[in-house]
Structures are given as structure tokens and as C-alpha cells.
Amino acid sequence: MSENLLDIKDLNIFFKSDKNPEPIHAVRDLSFSLKQGEMLGVVGESGSGKSITNLALMGILGDGAIVKARECSFNGRELLSLKEREWQKVRGGEIAMIFQDPMTALNPFLTVEFQIVETILAHLNISKSEAKNKAIELLLQVGITSPKDRLKSYPFELSGGMAQRVMIAMAISTGPKLLIADEPTTALDVTIQKQILTLIKSLQEKNNMSVILVTHDLGVVSEFSERVQVMYAGELVETGNTSDLIKNPHHPYTFGLLSSRPGAVERLAKTPLASIAGIVPAFHQRPVGCQFNPRCVHVQEDCKKGSIPIERGVRCLHPMMEALS
Amino acid sequence: MRDLSKEILSVDALHKTYDIKKLFRPTLKLKALSDINFHLDKKETLGIVGESGCGKSTLAKVLTKLEPRTLGEINLQGIKYDEISSHDFHSKIQMVFQDPYQSLNPRKKALDIIADPLRINTNTSANETRDLVMAMMKKVGLREEFALRYPHHFSGGQRQRLGIARALMLRPEILILDEPVSALDVSIQAQVLNLLLELQEEFKLSYIFISHDLEVVQHMSDRILVMYLGRVVEYGSRDQIFNNPLHPYTKILLESAPKTHREKSNQAITVKGELPSALNLPKGCAFEPRCPFAKPGCKESIPLLEIKQGREVACFEAH
Amino acid sequence: MKIFFSELFFELKKNCGAMIGIVFIIFSLFIAFLAPLIAPHNPTEVFADALRLPPSFISGGKAGFFFGTDDIGRDLLSRLIYGSRISLSVGFSVVVISLISGTFLGVVSGYYGGMIDRLIMRLTDLIMSLPSILFAIVIVAVLGPGITNAIVAVSVVAVPNFIRIIRAQVMVEKNRQYVQAAKLFGAGNARIMFIEILPNCMAPLIVQASLGFSDGILNVAALGFLGLGAQAPMSEWGTMLSDARSYIESSPWMVTLPGICILLTVLSFNLLGDGLRDALDPRLKKQN
């Protein structure tokens, strides 16, 4: 048995649809692993496959999806061979997830108390009053100051930041080994974002929990996660230590992403930003060869055919060597 | 500091109050904007920064007359807002919206979306309109053959270009940009920001750039207005605000914004709690309940904007 | 718009019921248009020697009168064929009248809100608080019996459905940013209501129009049955049903055949309406 909590090798996700006879290849040869207690940042734009991967890990992708992998083991168990009932135990128990929009993830007609207690009872074998005490304890843990009052609230009475705290409380209620945070702060203001991310970070360290932090914002990752992987059009394009990757990106996409942010390099205000031309290709118009080749400024002939392997953390035949300045 | 000959827009003591009517309950007053003062120079970009609920979107609506103001005066090129004919108004001030999916009519072709401002406001012939539309599409980086497509054929970035083209058709002098890139993917944001910079140069535009993304605002703006709960808390030049913020809220905002390239600061100041309800504002400084530097005096009265170190700040404790 | 309809048809093709409905509707349109060519006899021509003949394929029937004859010796098949003209045009008129007035009132009501909205909504509540056929009877009683008045009455009854559907949709659409953008370049209220907003409310309207068609046919037939709609010798299905009801035991075909015609026509429009709803709903969700 390996020491990794999560080991994924060559994960491929396809979607069937009525309109296209060819299944859509949404995630391609994705391999990564996660140690117990480690935080991994996943950065990608829309269509990068980052959210689909998470849903596949939770086993909630729906009927049209085909998930294949050479290995997809979590805590020594092969996830893809689990039966639905076993998966239900893992989901919400050992792997928990929080979403971008906490308001829609909470049921608007039920109190916070009902929803937390229900989650606890579903996974832990304790009495209702114990569950309620645990709920209060959890709300305190996630920084809610008057937990008894909050338990009686309905979701619409909570602010966005408060609702996300409640979601986190629910997620950690069963003592998960892995927390998947899918854009947990995109809908929140920056001051609240900082509070929530700090909270997730502290819970990770305190509970020795692994966290996958999905975001489109490299800034978020750079401050909170030691390790990062960048995804583009369903592929992992670059992975590594966050500060190294940000200082010295090798994949042209990572380079472009970083240098297109106004604050990335010292530059005069109101001067043109470096930008990546074109758009992320749609699922059914994915190019042959390197997925980034139509937009890449360093593209060469060999980029346009075959599949590109990952070498030293970069999926690029002609990685960039100069540092971002 | 103010040079009236350069000024294109000035806002004096602007207030906006919404009445919240509820059955069987007294009408509540929601102060969305309180005592807003600022001015905008020609060819300048004024950045407006603040979190949700600070009133920046309300400000955009009031400036574009989508919502009436409650009190105060707005002058456009020295003429009072109420005295400008609606035709003149529309051809002077236009807006680019945040959501490129909602701001384009899904049942209209790109050509019609861009051409309608001309068709409604001018007597341009059909052929000439077409030519002008094509020229504008080219300017904003859309290919001519896209003219007959519907919005759902366009990507988010292209839709935002369409929205910009539409706003520019009447050749306005002021463009209000309400979070113009926050709905776009990171790699697309830079494209649109570059386009906005080019267009500002070419059409001599003045921008009011509303955003919650501080790095973007810093890059785009000449001067910056920081808002909190309907009030201006700090108002100064880009360098003043970003290099030497005085108001605690500005400091915290800058501190909280995730940055890719920053030495991790040791003295992390984080803000306590969340935004108080706008229906029930504190008696004193609105930021006092969350402020790490608050003194007892802050609860007593609302700090007014005063000039400190060359910019306006509304804080008793800033010096 | 063209793409809209071609996509719509693509979705519809997958729906078996809707396709059956469409085929039958096209079939009846065909018959209605070509009635003078298809019908073997003049629908009002009386054959004094052929009273209440059973259909020709039953013993006692006579060749030349395929579906038999009625109590005063008119050819039933010809009357049914001509009846389809009346029913379809009645359905069409009802839908056109109620669609146009309902859409107008609904858009105005949803867009302006306030007093106008309250006035229009209370009016629709009033109409909807009575059983629709009862209200139609009241209107016909005031205006006098006849096919035109029956159409007017049935249209009035159908209007509230359109108003409510359109109003709800307009209230959603009017808050979208594209409407604000239109205001910003100086579009007037009429333009915003009918050029910007209305095309985005088409989907539920199309469904309601299809269902309104069958409601219209059914209600006018009901009025005809009660003697308040089409008057003799017009070969309207409802009226035919009513004229034949005293012979239900001796000559059951006289009642059955017009009844089946009404059933099939109404059913096919309902099938189409349901199919349209299924086809348009995911599109609606995608847009939101």
C-alpha cells in the first residue's frame, strides 16, 4: 500500500450525448496523487475539466458519463469498483465537498440545525442530542460566534460567507479524510474570501485533512497551497511546488495565465497586458496533439500530432525556460 | 487639484435611498448611496472599488439614469443632468454590463444588437449603418462574418466585445464599465482589458471602472474611489490608494486580495465579521464594528471626508 | 428565429405523440382545404329517400353514403368533412384573437406593473373564477347565439391564460441586463416591450397557443351542442352531436362520428402542445 491518500492514474472521463455519436472526451489521462494532510491547488478555466474530475471522485457524475482509470484508489480502496451503496458511505463520510454557491447547496426550506444534524446522523452512529451538541461544536470550530442562534436560522437568513461556513461545518462533521473545495470563495467578497480560505487552511492543519482546492485564481492558490496543478482543456498541463511554478512556469499556458494578470509583473499602469489569444476550445472541437497548440505562441510542427507526455511535471514538448519577469 | 476645464462629469452630494415597502410594516429606508462626491476628467479612468453591498452598482445605475437619484446634483460637461435631452444623454454616456450572457438579447443578431442604438437615435441609412457596424466590429476584434450570428454562438469574451461595440456606436464620451471582466475566464480578461485601453486612446473616452478585482482596477485606473456601505471612505490617485492606503478598510481590502506575486506579509490584518445590514447602519463609522483600529470615538459620529496626505479619507484615526 | 424553429423540430421529432399529433393535424388541414373536392355530396343537400341510413359498411347501408345519413337525409361524411373546416377555423380564430389580446395585455401588465397590472390581473381573476364554459354561455346569452359570437365568447374565456403566462415571463425578462442596455440607448417602452422582450417569451406562448387551439375547438363545440354556437344547417360538429342525441339508441353512428372527430382533433393538438412543452423546456432552462 502506498502512503498516498489518493492515487489517480490515467483518469479519463467521457460523456455520451444524443447529438454527437462520438463521446466527448472531457478529461484526458489525468494522473495525480495526494498525501494525507496535504493541500493541492487545482487551477483551470471553464472547460478545463477540474470540476468534472471532482464530481467523478465523488461518484456523482450522472448517467451519461463514462469514467475509466488505470488506478483510482482512495485510502487503499479502488473507488471506481465501489458499489453505489459503498460509495454513499465514502461520499460525505470520508470525502466531503463544498461548492461555489453555498446558497444553492443548502435546502432553503430546512433550518441549519436540521441539515447539519441530518448529515451527522447519516454517517455517525450517535443520538440526536449528541448530534446537536456536535453541530454546535462544529459551528464554533468554523468561526460562527453564536452557534445556538444560527442553528435555528434558515439559509436565506445567512450571508454568503456565513452560509459557506455552515457548508464547511457540514462537510467536516463526519471527519472526512479529504475535503474537495470547488471554487469555495468565487461568490464571496475578498475580505470574506480571505476569512474562509484561512479557515479551510487551519482545519486542514488541525484535522490532518487533505484538501483539493479548486479555483480559477492563481492568487488564491499561491497563498494557501504548497502544491498546485494547472489544467487546460481536460488535461493536466503543469504541476509542481506552487512558488516554483509561479516564479518559473514552464508550460506556455501557465506562463500566459500568469502574465495576463495585471499584478503578475511590474508594469506601468494602463499599458497592454500580455494576453493569450483565442479561447478554450469547446469539448467537441478539441485539437489533435497538444491541447494548447492553437493558442500557443511557441507552437511547432510536432505539437500538432500525437499525445504529449508529462515530463518533469510539464506536458509540453518545448517547455519555456526563461523566468517570468 | 480640480481643473474644471478638464472635467467631464461631476457628482455633488449624491444620495440614493430605496423605500422597502412591506405589508403591515412601516416603510424602511435603505440608504444605498450617501453623500457621494467625485468628478471625472476627460480621458481619465476613475476606478470604483468595494465589496458587494457597497453601492457601486447603484451608483452606475444612477449615473446612467436607469434609476432616479434621491438627492444631489450630477453635471455632465457642466450641464445639469435634468436639463440634458434624453437623446444627448444617451450619446454622451453609455455602459458595459457585467454579465455578457444577460446583457445581450438572445433573439437578436449581432448586427442588430450593435446597430440598434444608431437606428433609434439617428437617421443613418441602412447601408451606412451596416458599414458603421462592420467598422465597429472590426475595431473591437470581431470578424465581419459574425454579424449575422446570434449571441449564443459567441464565447463570453466575444459577447463582451459585442457589448462594448454596442456601447460605442453613439460615440459616447463616458463609458461606465460595471465589472466588465469579472465574468470572464482569466486568459480572456487580459484581451478585453487591452481592448478597453486601446479604445480609450482611440475614442478619447473617460471610463468609470467598477470592479471588485483590485489588481485589475490598479492597472486600469488613474484615480480610485473606495466605497463601503454606500459611502466613500477613501478617494485619491492610484499611487496614493495602492502604495499608501490610509483608511483601514482600504488597507484590509488590499491585504485580503489574493495576489500571485507577493512576499507573504507577516503582519496579516484580517477583518472581523461581515457587512452590517444596510437597513440598520451603525450610528458612527460604518466600518467601526469590523475595524481592527477602532477607537471608542468611532462609534459616536460618522467621520467626514477630509484631505489627508493629498487624498480624501473618511476616518478619524487616519493621519 | 429560423434556427429556433429548426431546432424545435429536431426536438419534436424525438417525441412520438407530438409527431402523431402533427400528422393528424396536417391530415385534417388537408381535408378542410380540399373539402369541396373530397366530399361526395353537398353537406346541406337533403336526400329524402335516405333518412338515418347506417354507414355503408354495415348491413342496411347504401353505397354512396359511406358514413350513412342523418335524420333529414344529409350525407354524414360530407357534413363531417365540411365540419372540419369550421372546427379548424374556429380554433384558429380563437387562438388568434386570444393570443393577440392576451399577449398585449400580458406584456403591458408585466412590464408596467402597478395600477395597470392590478387592474388587468383582477379582471383575469374575475374571468377565471367562473367555469369557462359558464362564462362563455353568459357572453353568448348577451350577444345572441351564432358561430361568430361563440368564437368571441370562447376567445374571451381563453385570454386570461395567455395574459398570465406572458406576464410571468415578461416580469422575469424585464429585469435582464439587455433590457437595461436598450433603455440606455434610448429605446422607448413600446420598443422594449414588443421588440426586445416579447421574442424572448415565445416558447411558453407557442405551447399555450397549441393547447388553446384544442380548448377553443372543444368550447365552441360545447356551445354548439347547447344550441348557442353554430346554427342549422351549418355542419358544425358540436351542433351535429346535439341534433343527433335523440337518436343515440336507434342510430348511434350519428352521435359517435362527430364525437370521434372532436376527440381526435382535440387530442392531436394536445399531443402537439405537450410535445412542444417538452421540447421547449430544456431550451428555456438553458437560457436562464
Image: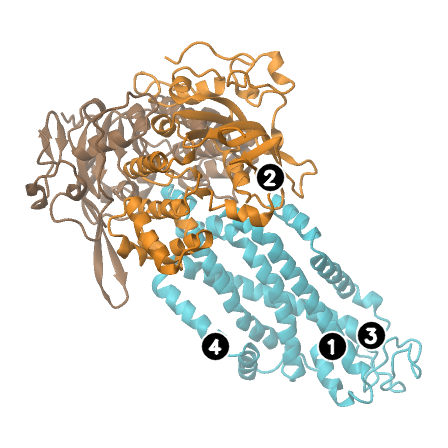
Name the mark on residue C129.
Answer: 4
Q: Residue furthest top?
A: A322
Q: Which chain is orange?
A: A
| Front residue (pair C35, C23) | C23
- Asked whether A10 or B103 is in front, the reply is A10
Residue at horizontal 66%, vertical 36%?
Answer: A23
Res C259 label: 1
- Give the CA distance from mark 3 to mark 2: 66 Å
Q: Amino acid at mark 1?
A: Gly
Q: Which residue is mark 3?
A: C77
Chain ID for cyan: C
Rounded to the nearest angstrom, the CA distance separating label 3 from label 1 is: 13 Å
Of labels 4 and 3, earlier in sequence is 3
Q: What amino acid is at disc 3?
A: Leu
Which residue is identified by label 2? A80
Please state which amino acid type lies under the numbered disc 2: Leu
Give the Cα distance between marks 4 and 1: 28 Å
Q: Residue at x 62, y 70 (%)?
A: C215
Chain letter matching colour brown? B
**Badge 3 sits on which subunit?**
C
Report the side of A65 relative to C111 (left or right): right
Q: Nearer the viewer, mark 4 or mark 3?
A: 4
